[in-house]
Amino acid sequence: MAPITFLEAIRQAMFEEMAADPSVVLIGEDVGVYGGAFKTSEGLLEKFGWERVIDTPISESAIIGAACGMSYLGLRPIAEMQFIDFIACCFNQLTNFVAKGHYLWNAPAPIVVRGPSGGGVHGGPFHSANPEMYFLHTPGFKIVYPSTPYDAKGLLKASIRDNNPVLFFEHKFLYRRIKEEIPPGDYIVPLGKAIVRREGKHLTILSYAAMMHTALEAANALAKEGIEAEVIDLRTLMPLDEETILHSVKKTNKCLVVHEDTKTGGIAGEIAAILAEKAFHDLDGPLVRVTSLDTPVPYAPTLEEAFLPNAQKVFAAARELARF
Amino acid sequence: MPASETRAKSSKLSRQQYLDLYYFMRLNREVEDTMTRLFRQNKIVGGLYASLGQEAISVGTAYALEKRDWLAPMIRNIGALLVKGVPPRDIFTQHMAKFTSPTKGKDGTSHFGDLENLHIVSPISMLGDLIPVMTGVAMAGRYLGQKIVTMTWIGDGGSSTGVFHEGLNLAASQRASLVLILENNLWAYSTPVHRQVRLENLADRAKAYGIPSYIVDGNDVVAVYTTAKEAVERARAGEGPILIEAKTFRRRGHAQHDPAEYVPREQRAYWEKRDPIDLYEKFLTEEKLLDPKRKKEIDDKIAALLEKEREFAENSPMPPPEFASEGVYCTGPECHDLKPKWERPVDELLPPKSSVDPVWIVDGFGRGSSSSGGTAPIHFGDVPAASTENPSVPAKSQGKPAAKPAKKPVGKKPAKKGGR
């Protein structure tokens, strides 16, 4: 099999799930005729028709509401946000209606809300968001943020088959930049399982999405200095794979978290709390955070570069932690 | 005061239908009266919201639905729930936060649903959210081949929310079989309708979405029912969403705590003389459909039922504290597994047999050439051959269409009815 892009992996996952199960439908802005702003749904309308690939008005609340309503009749809608930043427009529909349904009145909403997220592509303050933590704080969602084409396909398939609302973030920096050979045919990557991308003994680096690649780059540079970092890709933020995290930190005794989300209220803070509660005596150093600045995502390349973490920043922080 | 756009009462219902409407309006009011007493005894845990004077709307509209149809009430639509088959005990236990309630104490009031049997979607307090949700239910129903209609309610206040617009516009663009009842009770909490909207008739909001609307006297249950029935039939026939403005008045405050002193005395007096149950009793008596003996039978039946239901609710336990942490996620066998009920051949939807072939696809599109300077994809409206009636429904398909587009063209009927 020829290697495929992250973007193609997303498309294949939707295509295969729709082909296998007529209850899977796609709804969003420009997903049909245009094939999606990033072409993640190219060819789907042709194959599956207008009833299953639904172009909507610019109405994010209505997209989520309709997807949820469709799920009550047993469908499994995928709702696309053209850019994930626009998920803020349907915050109420998601957090008050979709997320609370199962707890309150036993109404599961098996919908997937997916869309391109993240920065590094000069998208500016309204096309670069990492809004995962708004929703991590809302009981009821599962939250997925893959870093490779293989995972993107397997996790999206698992998300579509899940009976809960899943927020599926696709880092647009990765869409066309990485390629991977993936096995033919059907497979899933289960939600809630992190993966060790690189084994090491001196410290643990936790990351996800585009920053996972940054973490690996830094780890390779650290190795040249004799520091062996264990790099873990979280893949799913909810449920969070505490077992894999704790297992690694109990081995390395040091932990650094890299995320592209802003620092305050990011997942690193939650992980710090988990380690303080469950691995306090195993820690030989402070939990270190390498994150974006606590600002909106700026537009100018010089500013965005200053805003985002990069391999140099991770390398410097990791080296200091390793020497602690 | 709004003009009374009462539809002719000549529409013939069967004797049983006339009496059903009466029974459910009476039941609605007695259920709420019982809850007012429970509230005063401190047995209602949270707020209590009354629909006094609006019973004809809840009952008359929901009575127009069939069993297979779906509804999503607002907080004042207890009557619609009763018509759909919800037993009064569910309403009592909800308000009293009992473990035997449909939400097992996790939510109160009319905030509960039943996806499996009664086809009720639970409301939430954020008004308007149910409009796109019920649009989605209608869209799924069409896709599955079920000929269902969905109905939800909104107030004069809720009709100013953003999601009202998004939802109704999506319903219109999808031509979803949604009937939206706009209960104009003249007050959004303490704000009168003329300070919310610069429209004399809120039905005019429908014009913005290119959909038909009706105005009806919300205190005339027969008019409400016959209007709703016509709207439901039109929606089921594929004409798309329909808005019905029912003019009425909220006779109690926003909730029990609110004495509603902001309401002008003359306005209240006018509407108290137009009590929907009194008006209907007079009509039934004149038409010789109700006599004192029959009325007493109904009184006794409701009293006996509510006594039993209230006792059940009062004797039910509160949920155990440990129940608080259960049920955030749908996991394991406890989870409600929703399966689609196909009422059309599933084969026609599965590739490679898929026959749904939209007319607006142009050569080269979808095979990679469109995204990089090949044949540009064409958009809705650019294609002369495409339907002008519903851009999301192909007017003609190459091959067999998977679902038939609506038979009747929209706009043939006058946009408004009811003697304006």
Image (cartoon, rainbow, N blue to C red):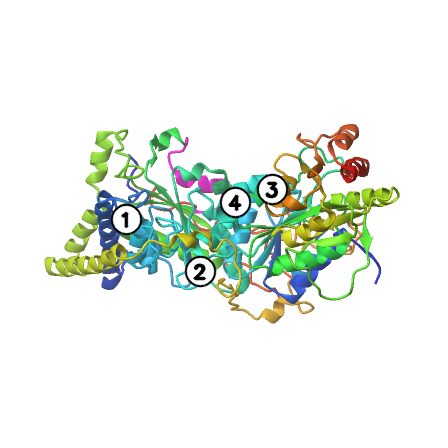
Q: Which label number is shown at residue A270?
A: none
Which residue is disc 4 drawn over?
A: A95
Q: Nearer the viewer, mark 1 or mark 3?
A: 3
Which residue is disc 3 drawn over?
A: A273
Instruction: Name the kind of residue labelled 2 in the image.
Output: Leu
Residue A101 position within the rendered picture, expressed as x and y whole percent measured from the top left = 48, 52
Q: CA distance from mark 2 to mark 1?
A: 24 Å
Instruction: Name the kind of residue labelled 4 in the image.
Output: Thr
Q: CA distance from mark 1 to mark 4?
A: 32 Å
Q: Nearer the viewer, residue B130 or B233?
A: B130
The chain carrying label 2 is: B
The chain carrying label 3 is: A
Q: Nearer the viewer, residue B71 or A283?
A: A283
- Would you say the residues marked 4 and 2 are in contact, meaning their CB atoms lie under 8 Å apart? no
Q: Which quarter of the figure is the N terminus of chain B placed in?
A: top left
Instruction: Name the kind of residue labelled 3 in the image.
Output: Ala
Q: Residue at x 30, y 36 (%)?
A: B2
- Would you say the residues marked 2 and 3 are in contact, meaning their CB atoms lie under 8 Å apart? no
Residue A295 position within the rendered picture, expressed as x and y whole percent measured from the top left = 66, 29
The chain carrying label 4 is: A
Helix, strand or loop at disc 3? Answer: helix
Q: Nearer the viewer, residue A32 or A289?
A: A289
Q: Which label number is shown at residue B55?
A: 1
The chain carrying label 1 is: B
**In the rendered view, does B12 fall on the left or right side of A220?**
left
Of the residues under marks 3 and 4, which one precedes in the sequence?
A: 4
Which residue is disc 2 drawn over?
A: B115
Helix, strand or loop at disc 1? Answer: helix
Where does the magenta region start and end? B197-212
Helix, strand or loop at disc 4? Answer: helix
